[in-house]
Amino acid sequence: MKIAVIFRRPGGPGATPEGEAAVLFQFAGYSVDVDRRELRHGAELIDIGPQVFDLLVYLIRNRDRVVSKDDLLDAVWDGRIVSESTITSRINAVRHAIGDTGADQTLIKTIARKGFRFIGDVEENKKAFPQASAGGVEVVAGGLRQEIHFCTASDGVRIAYAAVGKGPPLVKAANWLNHLEYDWQSPIWSHVLRAFAARYRLIRYDERGNGLSDWDVGDISLRGGNAAIV
């Protein structure tokens, strides 16, 4: 079985740039863990889609300026042309995730005919723990490193995949409701996955609509799920 992919900016706009320490952004009671791709309000984990998370991180990283719609298309949609309503929908989703609204605009301000700007007070901290490093490499017990990357399927959907271990390649087919990071740490699956990774080059991926892959997709059928697999 071969995996046919088109590679785009490994890690996506929400990843820590290569050579930089892992970052934790904090604002208005929220925290954004860039490497773990987690948004929390206090201790509560907020449910947020991968593309919405990337958009939030991009706005925070570029909070010193107004971000144009062209900037968003290039950074979040890899240069693909999308409708105004799609951009508006994602901005609204970001606002909803962080307790903001289009009426209040306390954290994300719309600048008429110019774009958007994150205006909240942000505290930027370097993470002191080594769970993750630049390039999506997660350090785990036993010296195994899980590398998480992203690719783009033929229909434009971003698919997250992970590789770990050395040896003959072993591809695990995705199942419904899997998550590359959570499954790797899960008390149910971790011992099985690490046993495979000790002997093989274990490759896993999150199916569309699951985990770190794009959630907002038009086709989640078996045929759609096979769009990136030949």
Image (spheres, grey):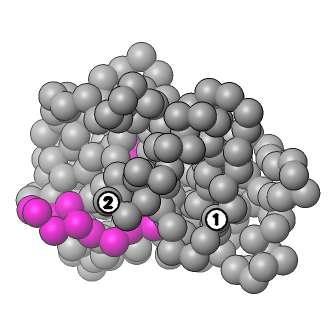
Relative side of 15 to 105, left or right: right
Q: Position of residue 81 (x, y in %)?
A: 74, 59
What amino acid is labelled 1 in the image?
Ala
* Front-lying residue, 7 or 26: 7
Neighbour tally class for label 1: few under 14, some 14-19, many 20 plus, Cα within 10 Å: some
Q: Residue at x 32, y 34 (%)?
A: 141
| Quadrant of the image containing the C terminus | bottom right
Residue 174 is marked as 1
* Front-lying residue, 118 or 167: 167
In the rendered image, the residue lying farthest to the right is 230
Can residue 229 be spotted in the picture? yes
Q: Are marks 2 and 1 in contact (CB under 8 Å)?
A: no
Q: Which residues are magenta?
A: 40-59
Quadrant of residue 40 in the image?
A: bottom left
Q: Secondary structure at mark 2?
A: loop
Residue 187 is marked as 2
Q: Is residue 33 above or below residue 105?
A: above
Q: Check if residue 46 falls in the magenta segment.
A: yes
